[in-house]
């Protein structure tokens, strides 16, 4: 659709009803509000790290086009996938605090979500490691014959890693049902895309590996939805990989460890937010259909803010995960070296309680 929320071609109507569209819009608002509050919380020293999704919220259209059993391999800017699949704000905030309710038991950086329940492999910070993993997962799904696929997200910067080439080549030669989704948001931290490659973006690389490829407007939720729906059909029916290059823009800093004003003009960012905001574009769409008003907008944002603040207040008071979790969940039974480390930690805590306070943990060891 265009920037005024009008479909460019009626034959490409997404086919979603009012409730489905409003759910997507409300999730975009919820994510946007959560990003603002959690980013500020990091600046206040209340959490250690955070990454926002500003400018890339339309990619939630991808989530809507997938089956809930499709296995997702994220990079670190895909919280919309979790919200769409049912993860609560409480669970997101608890993960960022690393408290006793954190699904990752305090072992991950904030926003490095993961959930077996929602078929989302836990995010890891090293770039591109998830790409060959997604190819292998898709091959396993094909062998199991369950008609589901793998979906792999990464940025254009990660496409410069060797794992990108290995993963795409594996998927192509082994006929793996996987959708590779490149979020080309213009910057790999401080490096603009103009300094990352001389070829025609990332899409041309997919063609080089013999992979069906499409480049889309990543700020258009219906382009994201339609392309993913078709890509999934190809992957499932033909056991073939598909590459989608979503052209979007990272309107926020790369993370709380970054200051993007050092390498790009503030006016550049302001112009994008003003003229090509994915949330605004969808809002025009629902307003054009008579489904939304300013009163609805105000109420939605007020409720979203209350939800996050309530979750924040609760999560901040909770204890950290049990110290036992330092050693569990890697091996079925603890190995001798882990048993020795656990014993050493227990002795240190007993000998130097003033240096190893355990009151803030759910339990000691």
Image (spheres, rainbow, N blue to C red):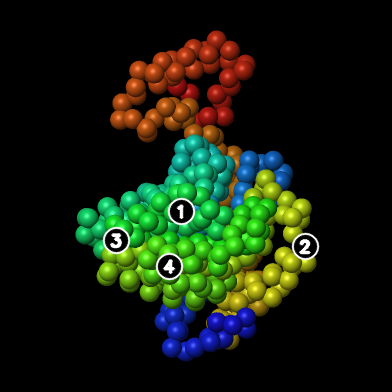
Q: In this view, does 261 lie above or below 29?
A: above
Asked if the residue at tag 2 contacts the one at tag 4, i.e. Cβ–Cβ closer than 8 Å, the answer is no
Q: Which badge, 3 or 1, comes first in the chain's sequence?
A: 1
Q: What whole-number distance in Å separates the C-alpha atoms at marks 1 and 2?
A: 32 Å
Query: Label 2: which residue?
Result: 266
Q: Is residue 314 in sight in this rendering?
A: yes
Element type where label 3 sits in the image: loop
Asked if the residue at tag 2 contacts the one at tag 1, i.e. Cβ–Cβ closer than 8 Å, the answer is no
Element type where label 1 sits in the image: helix
Of tags 4 and 3, the one toward the viewer is: 4
The residue closer to the viewer here, 138 or 307, is: 138
Q: In which quarter of the image is the N terminus?
A: bottom right
Q: Which badge, 2 or 3, comes first in the chain's sequence?
A: 3
Q: Which badge, 1 or 2, comes first in the chain's sequence?
A: 1
Q: Which badge, 4 or 2, comes first in the chain's sequence?
A: 4
- Marker disc for residue 340: none
The residue closer to the viewer here, 210 or 59, is: 210
Q: What whole-number distance in Å separates the C-alpha atoms at marks 2 and 3?
A: 44 Å
Of tags 2 and 3, the one toward the viewer is: 3
Query: Label 1: which residue?
Result: 164
Q: Is residue 297 in sight in this rendering?
A: no
Q: Which badge, 4 or 3, comes first in the chain's sequence?
A: 3
Q: In this view, does 226 lie to the left or right of 302?
A: left
Q: What whole-number distance in Å separates the C-alpha atoms at marks 4 and 2?
A: 35 Å
Query: Label 3: which residue?
Result: 175
Q: Where is residue 213 in the image (x, y as percent from the top left)?
A: 43, 70
Query: Label 4: which residue?
Result: 207
Of tags 1 and 4, the one toward the viewer is: 4
Q: What whole-number distance in Å separates the C-alpha atoms at marks 1 and 4?
A: 14 Å
């Amino acid at each position: 659709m265009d920037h005024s929320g009008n479909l460019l071609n009626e034959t490409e109507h997404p086919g979603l009803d009012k409730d489905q569209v409003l759910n997507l819009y409300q999730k975009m608002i919820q994510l946007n509000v959560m990003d603002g509050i959690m980013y500020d919380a990091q600046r206040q020293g209340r959490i250690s790290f955070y990454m926002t999704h500003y400018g890339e919220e339309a990619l939630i259209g991808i989530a809507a086009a997938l089956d809930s059993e499709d296995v997702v391999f994220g990079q670190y800017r895909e919280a919309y996938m979790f919200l769409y699949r049912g993860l609560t704000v409480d669970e997101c905030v608890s993960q960022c605090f690393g408290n006793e309710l954190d699904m990752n038991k305090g072992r991950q950086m904030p926003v490095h979500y993961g959930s077996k329940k929602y078929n989302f492999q836990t995010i890891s910070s090293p770039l591109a490691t998830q790409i060959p993993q997604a190819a292998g997962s898709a091959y396993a799904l094909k062998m199991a014959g369950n008609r589901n696929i793998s979906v792999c997200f990464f940025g254009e910067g990660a496409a410069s890693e060797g794992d990108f080439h290995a993963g795409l080549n594996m998927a192509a030669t082994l006929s793996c049902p996987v959708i590779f989704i490149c979020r080309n948001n213009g910057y790999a931290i401080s490096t603009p895309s103009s300094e990352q490659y001389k070829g025609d973006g990332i899409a041309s690389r997919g063609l080089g590996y013999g992979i069906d490829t499409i480049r889309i407007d990543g700020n258009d939720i219906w382009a994201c939805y339609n392309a993913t729906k078709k890509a999934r059909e190809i992957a499932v029916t033909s056991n073939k990989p598909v590459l989608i290059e979503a052209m979007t823009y990272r309107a926020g800093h790369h993370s709380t460890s970054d200051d993007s004003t050092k390498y790009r003009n503030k006016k550049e960012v302001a112009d994008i937010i003003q003229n090509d905001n994915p949330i605004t574009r969808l809002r025009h769409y629902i307003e054009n259909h008579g489904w939304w008003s300013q009163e609805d907008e105000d109420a939605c944002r007020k409720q979203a803010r209350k939800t996050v603040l309530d979750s924040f207040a609760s999560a901040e008071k909770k204890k950290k995960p049990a110290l036992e979790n330092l050693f569990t969940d890697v091996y079925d039974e603890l190995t001798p070296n882990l048993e020795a480390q656990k014993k050493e930690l227990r002795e240190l805590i007993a000998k130097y309680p003033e240096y190893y306070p355990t009151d803030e943990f759910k339990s000691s060891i």
